[in-house]
């Protein structure tokens, strides 16, 4: 399997955190900021011109608003549908945050998210119903199990000649990378790295030899101008 992991563009919560805003005002399912939309557009333009990215055959996304909005211009640039993945969301899922006692919040439904990304296809397991929002305890073992589920879903989908892309999240990415690279499950909580908004990670799994794992790049942001690089 060849895979491009992508972090979503800057969300309103990301901007609030980076500018010292009151975290009590965080949104459960924040949209992209104007900067986030520009990052997504630049990601799409870069991917359409990059010889390797132009080989992407399948595009997947978390079902959060910020991820789906990031997927929209990329899908258009590559001429692909976008398959939603139920379990690829950020650690913790959708909740009201500290102001609301971390009460679970329901995710959006297919028709609603298609207003942001017309190419979005809904998970078969959720047919006719909205995404639950995935609210969960902050438990590293649980995150690792969810990462294993996402990795299994991707491996099942990948044909020999396929190149996959997945739009996911900053805190969940280390658990998914640990799973894909064959590291012990606990390494997901120990891995620490910066993954900027719309940064990419390229992995090549099992193509050199059975069980092999090759990390081509991490946190690549050369599609962004310096003033558009955000965390």
Image (spheres, rainbow, N blue to C red):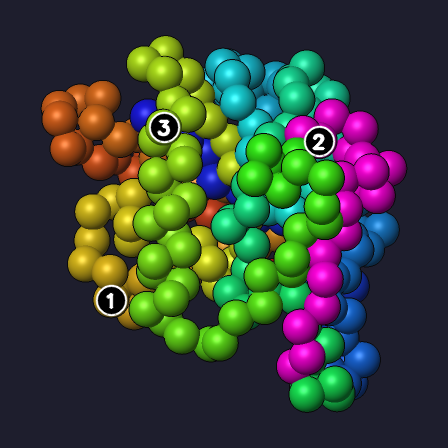
User: What secondary structure characterizes most of the magenta part?
Assistant: loop
Q: Position of residue 61 (x, y in %)?
A: 59, 40
Q: Is residue 169 magenta?
A: no
In the figure, residue 210 lies in which quadrant? top left
Contact between marks 3 and 2 (CB within 8 A): the answer is no
Q: Which residue is mark 3?
A: 156
Spatial distance from mark 3 to mark 2, Cα to Cα? Answer: 20 Å
Q: Position of residue 181 (x, y in %)?
A: 25, 45
Question: Does residue 167 appear anywhere in the picture?
Answer: no
In the figure, residue 80 lies in which quadrant? top right
Locate residue 46 relative to residue 219 in the image: left or right.
right
Ranked by sequence position, the earlier of labels 2 and 1 is 2
Name the residue: 68% across, 88% down.
101
- Label 2 crowd (10 A; few <14 / some 14-19 / many >=20): many
Q: In the rendered structure, which segment of residues is drawn in magenta? A: 102-121
Choose between 79 and 132: the one closer to the eye. Answer: 132
Spatial distance from mark 1 to mark 3, Cα to Cα? Answer: 24 Å
Secondary structure, mark 3, is helix
Which one is closest to the eye, mark 2 or mark 1?
2
Locate residue 159 relative to residue 84 in the image: left or right.
left
Position of residue 15 relative to residue 208, above or below, is below
Which disc number belongs to residue 120?
2
Q: Which residue is mark 1?
A: 186
């Amino acid at each position: 399997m060849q895979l491009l992991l992508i972090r979503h563009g800057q969300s309103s919560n990301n901007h609030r955190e980076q500018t010292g805003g009151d975290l009590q005002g965080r949104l459960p399912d924040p949209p992209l900021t104007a900067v986030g939309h520009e990052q997504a557009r630049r990601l799409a333009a870069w991917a359409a011109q990059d010889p390797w990215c132009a080989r992407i055959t399948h595009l997947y996304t978390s079902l959060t608003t910020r991820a789906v909005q990031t997927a929209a211009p990329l899908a258009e640039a590559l001429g692909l549908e976008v398959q939603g993945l139920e379990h690829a969301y950020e650690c913790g899922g959708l909740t009201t945050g500290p102001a609301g006692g971390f009460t679970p919040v329901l995710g959006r439904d297919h028709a609603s998210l298609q207003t942001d990304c017309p190419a979005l296809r809904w998970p078969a397991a959720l047919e006719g119903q909205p995404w639950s929002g995935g609210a969960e305890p902050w438990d590293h073992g649980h995150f690792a199990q969810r990462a294993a589920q996402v990795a299994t879903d991707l491996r099942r989908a990948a044909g020999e000649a396929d190149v996959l892309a997945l739009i996911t999240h900053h805190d969940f990415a280390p658990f998914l990378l640990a799973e894909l690279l064959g590291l012990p499950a606990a390494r997901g909580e120990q891995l620490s790295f910066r993954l900027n908004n719309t940064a990419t990670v390229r992995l090549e799994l099992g193509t050199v030899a059975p069980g092999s794992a090759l990390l081509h790049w991490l946190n690549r942001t050369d599609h962004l101008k310096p003033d558009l690089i955000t965390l």
